[in-house]
Image (tube, rainbow, N blue to C red):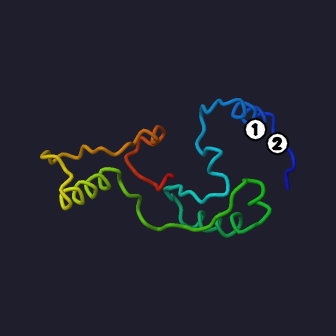
Amino acid sequence: MRVQFTKEELAIIERRRQGDQEGVIVSSDQQNKTITMAIEISDVHKFNMFLDKYLKDPNIKDQIGAKCVHVDFRKPIMTTELIAIQNYINDIIGLNKTNNDTSSDIDLSEDTNDNDGYDYGEV
């Protein structure tokens, strides 16, 4: 088990302590929370080997600072699908405007690093 950070890791940690959030994928307020990350599997057999060999190993869990709590087999939900559902519900309860496009009042400003059109369950 590794007990020391590399120089690069220490530099990133120090920058983040000083408030620099550039390049942050997982913010510090996500500590001890479960997040969802979608991955595209190119080789099922290699991926299964990876899950079995590494993510079940408690030493690896300590090294990467995370553990595997679930594997989700559903396809990612596209943001446009969520907006369509919101518009449908707003139509039912009478909150929608007269336009029928996919524009919405949803605040997506937190999705600054998510330009692929999918919602992976980010918190």
Name of the residue lying farthest toward the front: 94
Circle 1 sits in a helix, a strand or a loop, which is it? Answer: helix
Name the residue carrying label 1.
9
**Is disc 2 in contact with disc 1, using a CB cutoff of under 8 Å?**
yes
Q: Give the image quarter of residue 53.
A: bottom right
Q: Amino acid at mark 1?
A: Glu
Circle 2 sits in a helix, a strand or a loop, which is it? Answer: loop
Is the residue 55 above or below the residue 95 in the image?
A: below
Q: Amino acid at mark 2?
A: Phe
Q: Tell me how many marks there are.
A: 2
Left or right? Give the position of 118 relative to 42: left
Which residue is at a point 40% across and 51% down the rendered structure image?
Answer: 118
Q: CA distance from mark 2 to mark 1?
A: 6 Å
* Residue 85 x/y as whole percent: 27, 58
* Residue 87 x/y as whole percent: 23, 54
Is the residue 78 above or below the residue 58 in the image?
A: above
